[in-house]
Image: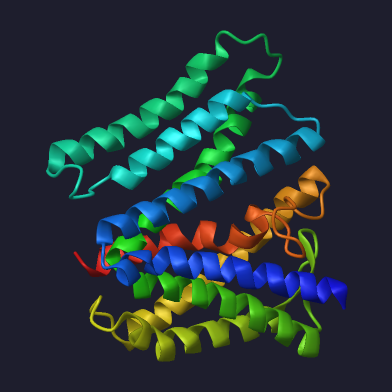
């Protein structure tokens, strides 16, 4: 009972923080403040995510260039955040400049390795870049979904939460056929399908209500977005499970009692966001 209460309180605080960060601009009537609050929160979450990746790799006995991992991750986040932000600059030159700087910053990890006495320099480079590619850049991209519409950003979180909840409930009641035992022995095909159906339904029925006139999306767009959140979100969960099994840990961290770490809570979002944003860009151009 105590575990359930702890998990419930921790989950409620998590939801309140996410909702407040998404709607800060609308509630205060200051869109710039809203962007800063949302961007700052997800930057902090990203830094915690880098810490979790590095810490869990160290449990496995794997070392990376820790200071460089933080520097590259934070700079990459800020560059993606600033990309095509009207309040900071406009035009193709600004956008092209940022897109050029991001890979240049990442390549500095290769250069930094030249001064390190390391028997496995290429592996170290890969592990050093892992948190930037897996955690920081996807979290930075959430800012652009947030810019597209607060309701739309909220709907992405709702879709992922609905998928996770109904996948768990359906799997618990009807689960018979294991999906991917090597990475997640408790996942079943029945649970995954149940989560997908609920996620698509939530997107179709709640999506239009959440966004209002923010974006011109039709029922087919919402169905596909729900499918993306479900399928890619589930794969994101499996990726994080693969990482934890590789490192030999049960949870990625302890920041959320009863839930684990940032990676445990954002595993689906990290993979789903780039795909959803790509689809949004395609249908609006």
Image position, residue 88 (x, y; %)? 20, 43
User: Do we see residue 203 in this rendering?
Assistant: yes
Residue at horizontal 14%, vertical 44%? 90
Residue 144 appears in the figure: no
Name of the residue lying farthest toward the right: 1
- Residue at image point 35% right, 88% down: 209
Above or below, 67 relative to 159: above
Direction left: furthest residue: 91
Residue 16, image quadrant: bottom right
Q: Residue at x 49, y 89 (%)?
A: 201
Question: Who is closer to the viewer here, 74 or 135?
Answer: 74
- Side of 234 where 112 appears, left or right: left
Q: For this view, does 156 lie left or right of residue 268?
A: left
The relative height of residue 45 versus residue 260 in the rendered view (above or below) is above
200 left or right, relative to 212: right
Quarter of the picture containing the C terminus is bottom left
Q: How is the image coloured?
A: rainbow
Determine which quarter of the picture holds residue 130: top right
Number of numbered tags placed on the structure image: 0
Q: Give residue 7's position: percent from left, percent from top.
A: 75, 70
Query: Where residue 47 appears, x then y in whole percent?
Result: 55, 42
Q: Please state, as top left, top right, bottom left or bottom right, where the N terminus lies in the image.
A: bottom right
Depth check, front residue: 210 or 250: 210
Residue at (81% x, 76% y) in the render: 4
- Depicted 166 relative to depicted 257: above or below: below
The location of residue 96, given as percent across then percent down, is: 21, 37
């Amino acid at each position: 009972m105590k575990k359930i209460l702890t998990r419930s309180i921790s989950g409620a605080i998590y939801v309140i923080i996410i909702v407040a960060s998404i709607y800060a601009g609308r509630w205060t009537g200051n869109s710039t403040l809203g962007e800063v609050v949302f961007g700052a929160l997800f930057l902090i979450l990203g830094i915690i995510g880098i810490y979790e990746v590095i810490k869990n790799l160290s449990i496995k006995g794997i070392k990376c260039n820790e200071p460089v991992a933080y520097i590259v991750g934070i700079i990459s986040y800020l560059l993606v955040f600033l990309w095509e932000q009207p309040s900071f600059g406009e035009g193709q030159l600004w956008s092209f400049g940022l897109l050029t700087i991001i890979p240049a910053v990442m390549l500095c990890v290769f250069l930094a390795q030249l001064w390190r006495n390391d028997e496995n320099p290429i592996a170290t480079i890969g592990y050093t870049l892992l948190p930037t590619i897996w955690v920081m850049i996807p979290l930075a991209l959430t800012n652009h979904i947030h810019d597209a519409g607060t309701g739309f950003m909220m709907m992405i979180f709702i879709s992922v939460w609905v998928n996770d909840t109904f996948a768990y409930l359906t799997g618990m009641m009807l689960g018979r056929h294991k999906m991917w035992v090597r990475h997640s022995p408790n996942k079943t095909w029945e649970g995954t399908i149940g989560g997908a159906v609920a996620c698509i339904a939530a997107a179709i029925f709640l999506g239009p209500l959440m966004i209002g006139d923010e974006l011109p999306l039709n029922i087919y767009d919402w169905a596909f977005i729900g499918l993306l959140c479900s399928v890619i979100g589930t794969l994101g969960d499996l990726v994080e499970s693969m990482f934890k099994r590789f490192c030999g840990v049960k949870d990625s961290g302890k920041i959320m009692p009863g839930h684990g770490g940032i990676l445990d809570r954002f595993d689906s979002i990290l993979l789903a966001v780039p795909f959803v944003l790509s689809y949004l860009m395609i249908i609006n151009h």
